Image (cartoon, helix red, strand yellow):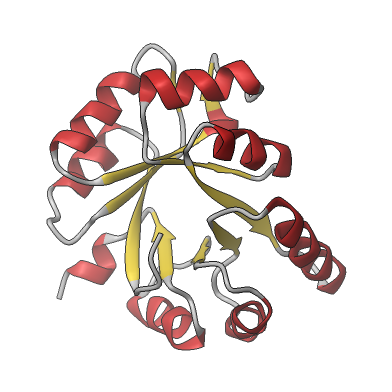
Amino acid sequence: MTHQQEVIATIHDHQGLVQALGYSQVKTLFVMNGDLMSLADTIATIHKAQRRVFLHVDFIQGLATDAKGLEYVAQRLKPNGIITTRSQVVQLAKKHGLITVQRLFLIDTGGLQAGIKNLRHSQPDAVEVMPGVIPRVIRELRQSLTLPLIVGGLIHQREEIQMAFDAGADAVSLSGFQCWYQQ
């Protein structure tokens, strides 16, 4: 993941996939769910459109996020990377050459401090922070981490996207990505 401002399409269903692929500006898609029977086709469609795809492996039906499960993801499904909330999954995925995005849910100051410590230990390639509508915390994370910083969750308006970028986010992930690209 590069340090540049990007809006990432978060995909929950086939309709969202079709919409995301209809926007040439969407370069990265986060596939949030699915099952082992259909994911290979979904990933192939995304790659054929020359876009990056990351799977949220915690939500894939039929997938165990153990060593063999991540080996299957890397060798058979072949996404560009994975998203997870779990440090041990980050470490397994990295062993298989996958780019890793670790999600961090912020609920209080203690959670923020523990999250920073956890990220320094697991060393994902990027971190996705939720919710993404807290500019002060985005600035604090930007100062504390050198990882690419993705923010998401509860973002619905162009102004909120711009606030996140202004606070130091490298990317914003959202289901309603159309608000960024439509005039």
- Residue 146 spot, x, y in % from top left: 58, 73
Location of residue 77 by image quarter: top left
Residue at 64 percent of width and 74 percent of height: 145
Q: Is residue 64 visible?
A: no
- Residue 41 spot, x, y in % from top left: 26, 21
Relative to residue 151, is residue 89 depicted above or below?
above
Relative to residue 78, is residue 82 depicted above or below?
below
Q: Nearer the viewer, residue 136 or 116?
A: 116
Location of residue 140 by image quarter: bottom right
Q: Nearer the viewer, residue 3 or 179?
A: 3
Relative to residue 149, is residue 47 depicted above or below?
above
Left or right: 151, with 14 as reference point: right
Q: Nearer the viewer, residue 124 or 160?
A: 124
Residue at 60 percent of width and 51 percent of height: 102
Residue at 59 percent of width and 16 percent of height: 68
Location of residue 117 by image quarter: bottom right
